[in-house]
């Protein structure tokens, strides 16, 4: 799924802790939440993909 550059910028700012979702313009909040959900899903790991040392 592709997201607008602006939604990605706001999402990154939220992940960095410099903004909160309440500070995102209302028309972008749903897109930013989707970006954050996508980022969360792509960074999670499960035991089946974790290499064993």
Image: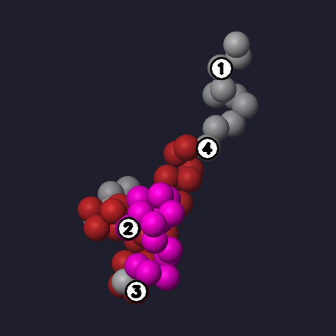
Q: Earlier in the sequence, mark 4 or mark 3?
A: 3
Mark 3, secondary structure of its residue: helix
Marker disc for residue 51: 1
Q: Which residue is mark 2?
A: 10
Query: Which residue lies at the image location 52% right of the left edge and 45% below the top edge?
Result: 42
Taking depth in this image into account, of 47 and 5 the one nearest to the observer is 5
Query: Which residue lies at the image location 51% right of the left edge and 63% below the top edge?
Result: 17
Query: Which residue lies at the image location 33% right of the left edge and 62% below the top edge?
Result: 9
Q: Earlier in the sequence, mark 2 or mark 4?
A: 2
Q: Which residue is mark 4?
A: 44
44 to 49, vertically: above or below: below
Task: Let me know if residue 33 appears in the view.
Answer: yes
Q: Residue furthest top?
A: 53
Segment colored magenta = 10-24
Spatial separation of the CA atoms under disc 3 and disc 2? 12 Å
Spatial separation of the CA atoms under disc 1 and disc 2? 33 Å
């Amino acid at each position: 799924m592709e997201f607008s550059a602006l939604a990605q910028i706001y999402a990154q700012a939220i992940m960095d802790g410099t903004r909160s979702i309440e500070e995102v313009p209302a028309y972008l909040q749903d897109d930013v939440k989707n970006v954050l959900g996508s980022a969360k899903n792509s960074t999670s790991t499960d035991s089946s993909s974790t290499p064993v040392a």
